[in-house]
Amino acid sequence: MSETNSSPVASGTGGAPSAEAAAPHRYTAAMAADIEARWQDFWDADGTYEAPNPSGDLAGDADVVARPKKFIMDMFPYPSGAGLHVGHPLGYIATDVYARYQRMTGHNVLHTLGFDAFGLPAEQYAVQTGTHPRVSTEANIENMKIQLRRLGLGHDKRRSFATIDPDYYKWTQWIFLQIFNSWYDESAGKARPIEDLVAQFESGERATPTGRPWSELSAVERADVLGGHRLAYASDAPVNWCPGLGTVLANEEVTADGRSERGNFPVFKANLRQWNMRITAYADRLLDDLDALDWPEAIKLQQRNWIGRSEGARIDFTVDGDDDARITVFTTRPDTLFGATYMVLAPEHDLIDSVLPAEWPEEARGKDAWTGGAATPAEAVAEYRKQAQTKSDVERQTEHKDKTGVFTGAYAVNPVTGTRIPVFVADYVLMGYGTGAIMAVPGQDERDWEFAEAFGLPIVRTVRPPEGWEGEAFTGQGPAINSANDEISLDGLEVAEAKSKITEWLVAKGIGEATINFRLRDWLFSRQRYWGEPFPIVYDEDGVAHALPESMLPLELPEVDDYSPRTFDPDDADTQPETPLSRNAEWVDVELDLGDGVKRYRRETNTMPNWAGSCWYELRYLDPHNADKLVDPEVERYWMGPREGQPHGGVDLYVGGAEHAVLHLLYARFWSKVLYDLGHVSSAEPFHKLFNQGMIQAYVYRDARGFPVPATEAEERDGRFFHGDEPVRRELGKMGKSLKNAVTPDEIAAEYGADTLRLYEMAMGPLDVSRPWDTRAVVGQYRLLQRLWRNVVDETTGEVTVVDGEPDEATLRALHKAIDGVGQDMEAMRFNTAIAKITELNNHLTKTGGPVARSVAERLVLLIAPLAPHIGEELWRRLGHSGSVVHQDFPVADPAYVVDETVTCVVQIKGKVKARLEVSPAIADAELEALAVGDPAVVAALGGAGIRKVIVRAPKLVNIVPA
Ligand code: ANZ
C-alpha cells in the first residue's frame, strides 16, 4: 500500500453549526460523515482489503499468503429494487467485524460479497414495465453497492460478481455439463465420467437393461440407457405444475397446503418432461458428512429429516387370481406382517389398471363406501384419481384428516396368513415414496387404523399394547402377538428381533429383502422462465439431448420482447407450460457443428432454477477472473482444502439466515460433492462452519382497522400508542415497506454515522437471537464514540491530548481485562459483550479524568477498530501512525493485570486469627465460607470439633464458632 495515493487527513470541518461554535472538533454526525467518506475512498484506492492468492492474477505478498487463511462469507443478497433496510446488513456487519479481527490476529482473510441476481422479481418487473431484467437488476446492484459501501465493509472488491454475469454463468453452465456427463458408480461410491459407463457397456462388462449388445442399440436407445444413469437427466415424472404462475416448482417451493410459496396459487401433479438432478445418489454421503461440519444442530437435524433415511423391507404380495402380478410394498415394520389386513396403492400407481377386474366382486356389493357408488371399479378409480390430483402431498398425508379411498375390486394374498386382503386406492399413500404401495396394519399404524374404521376393515393387533389400551393403534414397543403360522413364529419377540427374524424368512422365501429408503427426491431443475441460466443443451432431430462443447459457453440469453411464461387459469390442471424462450425461433432452431459436421438442432428452452447460481459461488470468489478454469486447483486447495479439524474442507465461516436450512445448503453440498468426485476441487463440503444470525424485527403500529400506520408517526403517551389522536396497537413484526416500519441504514448513517450504526447492530444482543430495532436507542452507541473521541482529541483545538508515560495501576488492570475479554468475545462472535467491555474501559478513562496515556489510547483504538473501522482509522492516524489500522496486530493482554485484584480475608476461631486468605473483592459469602472452613490451618485448629456457627463478612472477615 502507498501512503501518498490518497491523503485522508482530517479536514476538521465536522460538527453541526451549534456544536461547532462551542466545540468545533467534536465527533458529530457531520464529522463522522467526513471521516467515513475519506477512509472509504482511501480503502478503495489502497486496496486495503485485497487478499492475495498463492498464484494467478490475484497472487500477492508471499508473507501474507504464508499466514493461516480464513475464508469468511455471507449468504449473498438478491438485489431487490427496494434496497436495504437496517435488518439486512446485520450478518454483513458481523462477518466484517470478525474478518477484521482475524486480519489483526495474523490471518490472510478472504471476505467479499457478490449478488444472486437471477430470479423472479426482476422478471415480473420486466413483464410489467418492459424494462429488460438485466437493466433493472444492474441498477439495483449499483444502488445496493452504494448502500453497502457506506457501511464500511472490508470486502475484496476484485472478487465480487453477480450470477447474471456471462463470465460467471458460463461456469454454472459448465458445471451443469459436468453433472450431465457423469453417473454415480455405486461400487466406487462416487460420480464418474459418463464415458466410463459407455466403455463398460461397450465391452460387455455391464449389460444393457434389455440385454442387447450396446453396438446394436440405436442412438435414441443409447441416449435412453444413459439417461437412466446421468446425474442430470430429463424425465417425464409427476411434477408440481402451477398454471397460475405458468411454471413447474420444486417440492421445496410448494407450501404445506399445496399452493405455490410465491403467489399462493394452486399446484397440481402433472406428468411433464423436465430436467432433474440425481441428488438421491448422494443421500448417504449428504447424511454422513454432516457429522464433521460445525453447523447449528437444528440445521443438521432439518437436513437429516429432509433426507429421511428409513431402514425397512420390501415385501412382495401376489394378486389373487393373477399369478404374474405382484404388489411390492416398502415397510419399516415387517414384524407386523401378520396384521396386514388390506393394501393400498397410491392413485398414480401404474399397477392399478392391470389389477382392476371388469366388475365388482361379490363382497363389494352394497358397500357404497368401498365402491364410491360407481358402476365399475374402473369408473370408481378414475373418479377418485381426479379428486386426488388437486391435493398436495402434504395435504394428503395430514394426520387425523378423514381418510378417503376406493376399492379396486382386486384382492392380494397376505404371504404369512394366506388370507385374501382387499386392495384399495387411497391418497394417503404417495407415489413418490417407497414403492407407492403399502401393506396396511391398522393395529400398529394410526393412519391405517383411521382408514380401517372408515371402511369397516378388520383390525388385528400384532404387538401387545399396555393394559387397558383400546380404541386406537399401538405404535410403541412390546412383544409380538398373533404372529405365528406353521413355518414361523414371532410371538413373544420384541420389535427389533421380530423384524430381523421375519426379514430373514422373507429373504429365504424369495419374497422380500431388507432395504433402506430415503425421503429425499431428485431435484427438479428446470423452470419455465426467462430470467435464468439457459441450459447448454440442444436436441437433434431424434430428440436426443446433446451437450454443447465448452467452446460454445457461455450460451447467453437471447434478447426478447416478451419475458412472461404463459400463465393460465390457476385452477385449470389440464394446461401445459409454454416457456418464454420457445417463442424465439432464431435462437431456438440452430445449425451447429458439434464435432460431426453441421446439423440442425433445437435448443432446450427451459432455464435453470434460481438456486443454480448459489450452488457454487464460494468457488468463484477464489479465482473470479480465471478464463480457463472454474477455479485454479492450487488456489482452491489454499482457501478451501481439508485442514486439521475440517476433514472435508470448506469455507471457514458462512453466515446467513436459518431459512436456507434445506434448499440452498443441500443443493450446494451436492454440487460440491460432484465436483469433488470428478477431481475439480479438493473440498467435499462447501461450508465448514455455519452460523445463523437472528432477525432484526420492528414494531408495527396498526390502526383500528388493522392497517399499519407509519411507525415514525406513532407516539407513546402514558404507555399507550397513538397516531395523531387515534389510538394504535403496537406489535412486533418483520421490517419492511408493507408494514410501514422500514428504517434504512442510510438514514441512520446520516444521523449518526455508519460506525454508530455498526456498533448499535452489534450491541443489540447475541448475534443468533432476534431483536427489535429501536431507533431511539442508537444514540447510546453514538455517545460511546463521542466519549472515545474526547479521550483522545481536544474538542476545542482538535489537538491530540494523549500523554507519554505509564498509566496508573487501576487503568492498567482495566485495559488488560478489556483486551483479554474483547479478544475472547471476538473469537466467539460475542460482539455485544465485546462492546460492553470496550465501553467499560472507555468509561473508566473518562471517569479518571486528565489526559489518557498514549499506550492505553492506542490499544483502545485497536480494540474498537474491527467494530467501528472509520473512527478507528482516523484516531490511529491522528495518534501519529502512517499505516492503516486494518493490518495492525490486535493487542495482547498481560496476564499479570488480568487476574483479579485480591483482598486479604482474616479467618478467626472464637475471635483468634487462624488463617489469612487472598480472595476476590467480589467473592460471595457462601464461597468465602467454603474456602475458610476448608483451609488446612483452620481444619487443624478445629481439631475435629464440629462447627456451631459461621459468621461471614465478605470479603474481609470470617468468624467460626466451634460446637
Ligand atoms: C406397514 C406398517 C406397519 C408401517 C406399522 C408403519 C407402521 P417412514 O418411517 O417415514 O419411512 N409407507 C410406505 N410407503 C408409503 C407411501 N408411499 N405413502 C405413504 N405411506 C407409506 O414410513 C414408512 C412407513 O410408511 C411404511 O411402513 C408404510 O407403512 C408407510 F405398524 O408398513 B408401514
Image (cartoon, rainbow, N blue to C red):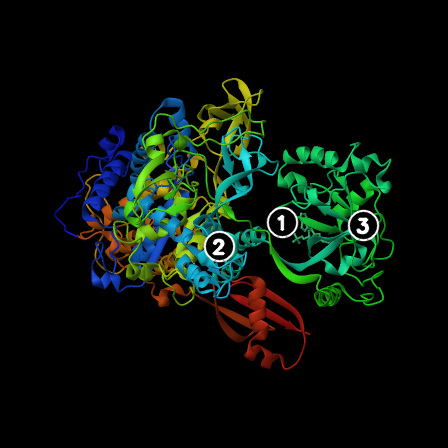
Instruction: Give the mark nearest the N terminus, 1 or 2.
Output: 2
Number of other residues with Cα within 10 Å of mark 1, as a class: few under 14, some 14 to 19, many 20 or more: some
Q: Are marks 1 and 2 in contact (CB under 8 Å)?
A: no
Query: Which picture quadrant has residue 822?
Result: bottom left
Query: Which picture quadrant has residue 467?
Result: bottom right
Q: Residue furthest left?
A: 4
Secondary structure of the residue carrying numbered label 1? loop
Secondary structure of the residue carrying numbered label 3? strand
Q: Is residue 192 above or below residue 693?
A: below
Query: Which picture quadrant has residue 114?
Result: top left
Question: What residue is disc 1 on?
Answer: 433
Give the camera-side residue of 727 and 789.
Answer: 727
State the CA–CA distance, disc 3 to disc 2: 37 Å
**What residue is at 79 percent from the left and 38 percent from the top?**
359
Which residue type does callout 2 highlight? His
Q: Position of residue 784 (x, y in %)?
A: 35, 43
Question: What residue is disc 3 on?
Answer: 421
Residue 268 shows in this picture:
yes
Question: What residue is disc 2 on?
Answer: 229
**Under 8 Å from ligand 1: the CB of mark 1?**
yes
Q: Is residue 157 above or below residue 402?
A: below
Apparent side of residue 935 relative to residue 949 in the rendered image (left or right): left
